[in-house]
Image (spheres, rainbow, N blue to C red):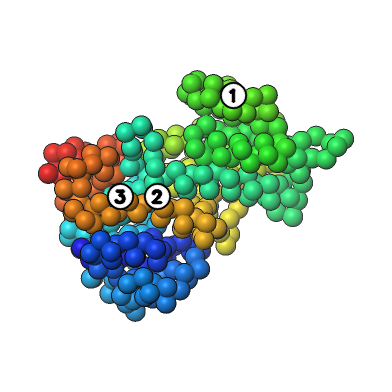
Amino acid sequence: MKVGSVREIKNNEFRVGMIPDNVKSYVNAGHEVYIEKGAGAGSGFTDEEYIAAGATMLDTAKEVWDTVEMMVKVKEPLPEEYPLFHEGLILYTYLHLAADKPQTDALLAAKVKGVAYETLMDRNGCLPLLAPMSQIAGRLSVQEGAKYLEKIYGGEGVLLAGVPGTPKANVVILGGGSVGTNACKIAVGMGANVTILDVNLQRLAYLDDIFGARIQTLASNDANIEKSVKEADLVIGSVLIPGKAAPKLFKKKYLKEMKPGAVFVDVAVDQGGCGETTRVTYHDDPIYIEEGVVHYCVGNMPGAVPRTSTIALTNATLSYGLQIAGKGLEQACRENEVIYSAINTYDGKLTCKNVADSFEGYEYVDVRSVVK
């Protein structure tokens, strides 16, 4: 198969879908690999490294899109890339369609086979292609939140760990999944007072076993969320329903009750955000202040550390990519049913129920009925 990767064009996105080691793996498996010149520069990979691994370098992204049967990316395509779609193309990337109706329409119109990293679910119910970015985003959320608590950014001027004789900061984490757990690790490690909320009591028991008396676990409901955020210096929104728009747990009315200069970091922004006051921001202008609360809502948080993020992501995506390229998407699904869960669009049909439920007027089609 002809497989390719292009430079990401999202604002301040420096990750890349394939690293030279991946190229070597695809080439050794008998595939042709095409890379846009300069695609890996933001993550520290040179064109010479790609060439040495066996890639063919092309001058423009259009040339790559026009050539390949399978495109391996990091972020969802932007409107400038929609005209480059072609029927039957396998697009293997994060799609986050529940927050992006125009992209959904473009993929359906072009009959692209949209294979989404974020909905691939293994037999244990885990999301192995989302996990590495969740780990990074969770850890970054506390790092960024701590920074924007500084007074020069509009924060209340609080140090997370405090010092002897001063109060520690209160960190509240909404959601105890991969993002929340990783945020918790960093917040605890920095010495903050940490409260974590989740609807799954078994998950809370697990977190309580891991962190013990260093954290407070609470069942996630409106009353507990409201009480917790009133005293919070930093709130991390880390709620995820695979493929579906995030629920709005962080209400606008809470802002007036919070400390002036508190910080809200919404890691769920790619799926529409879990805050009623969330709007997408970018690394070059990451924050805004609403009702005195600093909001950090960057939609590609791991892009801030592209070297780490790219290596972590491609470690996870390579094995599934090789299966799809080697057998074709349909046969790969027959031999590994896990891959069905990643297919969001196929031959003009919407095949992810949670995405279909996010919009009115969209018909969901069972993926197994069309991918044969």
In this view of the protein, can residue 6 be seen by the observer?
yes
The quarter of the picture where the C terminus appears is top left
Q: Position of residue 204 (x, y in %)?
A: 54, 24
Look at label 2 and name its amino acid: Ala
Q: Position of residue 106 (x, y in %)?
A: 26, 56
Residue bearing the label numbered 1: 208
Task: Please identify the residue farthest to the right as the structure is shown.
Answer: 165
Residue bearing the label numbered 3: 320
Residue 287 vertical placement versus 138 (above, below): below
Task: Please identify the residue farthest to the bottom as the structure is shown.
Answer: 59
Badge 2 marks a residue whose secondary structure is: helix
Q: Residue at x 28, y 74 (%)?
A: 63
Residue 61 sits in quarter: bottom left
Q: Residue at x 50, y 48 (%)?
A: 279
Look at label 3 and name its amino acid: Tyr
**Label 2: how many Cα within 10 Å (few below 14, some 14–19, many 20+):** some
Residue bearing the label numbered 2: 316
Q: CA distance from mark 3 to mark 2?
A: 8 Å
Q: CA distance from mark 2 to mark 1?
A: 28 Å
Position of 279 with respect to 347 (left or right) is right
Residue 9 sits in quarter: bottom left
Badge 3 marks a residue whose secondary structure is: helix
**Label 1: how many Cα within 10 Å (few below 14, some 14–19, many 20+):** some
Q: Residue at x 58, y 45 (%)?
A: 139
Look at label 1 and name its amino acid: Asp
Q: Earlier in the sequence, mark 1 or mark 3?
A: 1
